[in-house]
Amino acid sequence: MGALDEGHFDVELENGMKLGCLELGFEGEPETVAIEDAVKVLLQGLGEDVNREGLKKTPLRVAKALREGTRGYKQKVKDIVQGALFPEVGLDNEVGQAGGAGGLVVVRDLDHFSYCESCLLPFQVKCHVGYVPSGQRVVGLSKLSRVADIFAKRLQEPQRLAHEVCLALHSGIKPAGVAVVLQCSHIHFPNLETVFLDSNHQGWVKILVSAGSGVFENENSDVWGDFLGLLKFRGINVEKIQTRDPVTKSWCPSCSSSGATISSELAPVNPGMVSAVASILRSLGEDPSRKELVETPSHFVKWLMNFQNTNLEMNLNGFVFGKTDPRKAKGEASCNKEHFHSELNLSFWSQCEHHLLPFHGVVHIGYFCPEGLNTIGKSLLQSIVHFYGSKLQVQERLTRQIAETVSSILGGDVMVVVEASHTCMISRGIEKFGSSTATIAVLGQFSTDPAARAVFLQSIPNITTSGG
């Protein structure tokens, strides 16, 4: 049967079988239903209509993503390692270590994601694992990644994750020692009231942590040096690895004064929304009263409230959208109809309405300025971008709305390109790290002039919006 056989494809969907790496399960289970109900409370707290098109299936999507992303609570290491140990002899009458008796084994660049226990947002993990076999046996290499995934698929913080992976592998395969280094990247949102004032904002908080057991317990040991030496080949700055002491200060931006803050113009945190998030934690098998989770519901709600459905007025530098003649707006010198202008790399942060997960990136705007009109200043365009980004969105709609608004000011000829990194691409079954999405809207002359489109596209710098 061909891979694209339509009948077989439909049967797979109907039976809830695996489709690629995405497991179509959890629907109708009590935990899933409880999370769905909690998500509806959150959406209503944002002023949204849970029955509107685009949001109808959001509670189920969020519930399935969270349950898939925390499935590690119900998995056991022994079920993975058992039967995956293979006999492998060491050196025969030679001095040294190799094979199943002392030869260092390192598996690098294992991509995982985990949910931050402080804010419930996903963070990226690049895992490097080394171990020294003993007893003339080795473990199947894929099992190292699968064991790491068990602990990544829980609410986590980096140092504890490293220790849990290390200890689980040491207990499961009984080696001479295990070494773990994690490169973790947490999306770092700006203060959304001043996003277009801080051009130097760093979009990611990054940390390197390590754990070691057995022969790797001593960070000054030769074998630990060998392990780090093999990581340097991958461009990893091992000097930045944190000490193995328990982290006393959370790395999560939500716990920092420089993290995203709820707008002063928006309503206080809704207690019902906080209770809903606590209910989600319980449905995932966690205890909301655990000290590391006590503030998590309020952290998540404060972030979510930045995308409240309100009637905030768009600030368009001298006039209010739809109310003032744009010819009277202050700007640069007037240009004639043939002149092309662009503003590139206007940053934005938004929240996907399908999964309640963030996406962020940059917007590029090109336009022809009609005769008699002033060019649009960068701050005005950034204000438009920020206005439409600060709500539950999808990238396609965001692109269209920006283009239509700019077009209404200038009278027509506009092209908009949005490049974004979506958290849902790493924290659901698809798990495509490093991917980015581009969307385009063309109005007026740009819709019929390939040469104009090409000129604009060639002006866009070669940058990346992804983290890690």
Image (spheres, grey):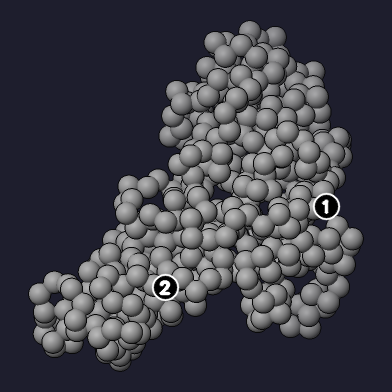
- Residue closer to the observer: 279 or 321: 321
Q: Which residue is mark 1?
A: 283
Single out the mark in the foreground, 2 or 1: 2
Q: Position of residue 302 (x, y in %)?
A: 59, 52
Can residue 9 be seen? yes
Q: Position of residue 89 (x, y in %)?
A: 75, 21
> In the image, 163: left or right of 79?
left
> In the image, 171: left or right of 396?
right
> Image quarter for residue 17?
bottom right
- First reached walking from the N terminus: tag 2 or tag 1: 1
- Residue closer to the observer: 235 or 262: 262
> Image quarter for residue 45?
bottom right
The residues tagged by marks 2 and 1 sit, at their Cα atoms, a distance apart of 38 Å
Q: Which residue is mark 2?
A: 313
Query: Quick check: 407 above or below 126?
Result: below
> In the image, 450: left or right of 16?
left
Q: Position of residue 92 (x, y in %)?
A: 71, 14
> In the image, 334: left or right of 170?
left
Q: Residues within 10 Å of mark 1 (few under 14, many from 20)?
A: some
Q: Position of residue 356 (x, y in %)?
A: 63, 62
**Residue 441, disc:** none
Identify the residue at horizontal 41%, vertical 65% (top origin).
386
- The residue most toward the right is 30
Q: Residues within 10 Å of mark 2 (few under 14, many from 20)?
A: few
Identify the residue at horizontal 80%, vertical 53% (top origin).
279
Q: Amino acid at mark 1?
A: Ser
- Residue closer to the observer: 450 or 41: 41
Q: Amino acid at mark 2?
A: Glu
